[in-house]
């Protein structure tokens, strides 16, 4: 008889032999499941293991025999409070699903190049969530997310862009016991309570402004003024510390769901300011914008990123209304880690602490996928966490 609740476990290894490392990491995960079957496994591998990924997968299947397995190559991995940013490591995240739940794997592609037509996209209508792992060179992730949003905007899609390739410079995606060299792999989840958490690592500054004229990714006017003039005026009103942060790289936060009466930090889709034309006053941003959207200046620093992640995780724990987290999948930017925080294990330790030690695992991605304002986007410098409720 199946369990009433989901059970999650994780294992990590750095053994020099890929077959042995896969078997040992999978055995650790199997022990954490307490003898229950592994309905779903996600595998993230870095370093020398990408020279022989098939051997790694063979070892994992020999110890765990998961019904469904997906995964990818990574520049670094993390598990249970530890971050292994460089070198060789493998993490195996495994779950036994509750009775009535299901995990359905899929492979999608664009004919071997990112400009091709999307193929193999799964039916996500009626599911509770989807996990997507994509190769940046051969898969159109933004187009895929737009298609998901058109089909089932209420279904959150989380995941990441692979940040490492095989020794032969091919894509490194894992599907069952196979190495997939291009496209994307993923899984749709039904009957699983997943709480998406997207921490974009940026803090808002200044006042909110409404776009009053825009075209494509160009903001021509904010609150009836030329956009550049409005932004410069807002910056002039900031404190010296805030101005110093903005000077390191100004970002724009765009509210996606403008139907709310007020906006909090997590309501903004954070994108870069790409440039400005002083003559026309137009400002180019890294997203398509339209009149009526509300925007606010943002800046990124270690303190803001730390506070944002803690607050976002705390919100998800409160949303469980007294239940405990069963575990989490983590997709954090490869620009975070020691480069951002100047300490080891920042995101992994924060997630472990805020989720009460629940098993977690993931990888350092070249782009993170998660929802903002009810729609899933591709992000940068974010920590995206799929929190599973027990």
Image (cartoon, rainbow, N blue to C red):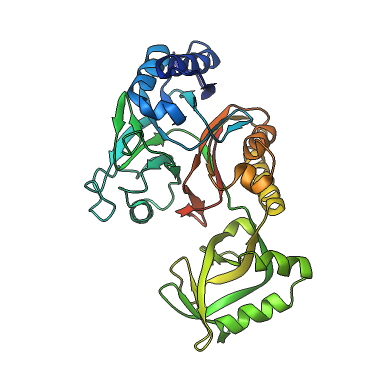
- In the depicted structure, whether residue 238 falls above or below residue 40: below
| Residue 382: image location, x then y, percent | 56, 49
- Closer to the camera in the image, 193 or 104: 104
Is residue 157 something one can see in this rendering?
A: yes
Q: Residue at x 62, y 78 (%)?
A: 231
- In the depicted structure, whether residue 54 falls above or below residue 318: above
- Closer to the camera in the image, 55 or 47: 47
| Residue 155: image location, x then y, percent | 43, 47
Q: Quadrant of the C terminus?
A: top right
| Residue 7: image location, x then y, percent | 53, 22
Q: Quadrant of the N terminus?
A: top left
| Residue 180: image location, x then y, percent | 29, 34
| Left or right of 325, for residue 46 | left
Residue ranking furthest to the top: 35
- Closer to the camera in the image, 279 or 127: 279
Residue ranking furthest to the right: 240
Is residue 222 something one can see in this rendering?
A: no
């Amino acid at each position: 008889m199946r369990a009433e609740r989901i059970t999650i476990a994780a294992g990590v290894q750095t053994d020099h032999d890929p077959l042995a490392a896969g078997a040992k990491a999978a055995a650790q995960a199997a022990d954490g499941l307490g003898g229950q079957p592994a309905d779903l496994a996600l595998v993230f591998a870095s370093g020398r293991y990408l020279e022989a990924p098939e051997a790694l997968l063979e070892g994992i299947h020999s110890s765990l025999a998961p019904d469904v397995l997906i995964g990818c190559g990574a520049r670094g991995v993390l598990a249970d409070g530890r971050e292994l940013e460089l070198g060789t490591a493998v993490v195996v995240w495994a779950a036994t699903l509750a009775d009535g739940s299901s995990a359905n794997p899929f492979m999608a592609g664009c004919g071997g190049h990112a400009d091709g037509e999307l193929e193999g996209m799964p039916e996500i209508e009626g599911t509770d969530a989807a996990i997507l792992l994509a190769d940046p060179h051969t898969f159109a992730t933004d187009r895929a997310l737009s298609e998901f949003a058109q089909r089932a905007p209420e279904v959150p899609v989380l995941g990441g862009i692979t940040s490492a390739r095989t020794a032969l410079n091919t894509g490194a995606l894992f599907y069952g016991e196979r190495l997939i060299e291009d496209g994307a792999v993923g899984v749709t989840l039904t009957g699983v309570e997943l709480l998406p958490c997207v921490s974009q690592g940026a803090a808002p500054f200044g006042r909110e402004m409404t776009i009053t004229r825009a075209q494509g990714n160009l903001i021509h006017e904010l609150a009836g003024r030329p956009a550049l003039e409005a932004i410069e005026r807002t910056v002039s009103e900031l404190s010296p510390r805030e101005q110093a942060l903005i000077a390191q790289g100004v970002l724009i936060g765009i509210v996606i769901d403008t139907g709310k009466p007020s906006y909090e930090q997590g309501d903004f889709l954070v994108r870069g300011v790409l440039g400005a034309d002083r003559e026309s006053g137009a400002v180019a941003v890294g997203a398509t914008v339209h009149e009526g959207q509300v925007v606010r200046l943002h800046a990124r620093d270690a303190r803001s990123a730390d506070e944002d992640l803690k607050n976002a995780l705390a919100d998800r724990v409160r949303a469980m209304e007294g239940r405990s987290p069963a575990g989490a999948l983590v997709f954090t930017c490869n620009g975070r880690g020691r480069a951002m925080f100047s300490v080891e294990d920042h995101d992994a330790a924060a997630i472990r602490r805020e989720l009460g030690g629940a098993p977690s695992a993931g990888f350092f991605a070249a782009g993170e996928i998660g929802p903002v304002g009810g729609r899933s986007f591709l992000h940068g410098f974010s920590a995206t966490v799929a929190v599973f409720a027990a």
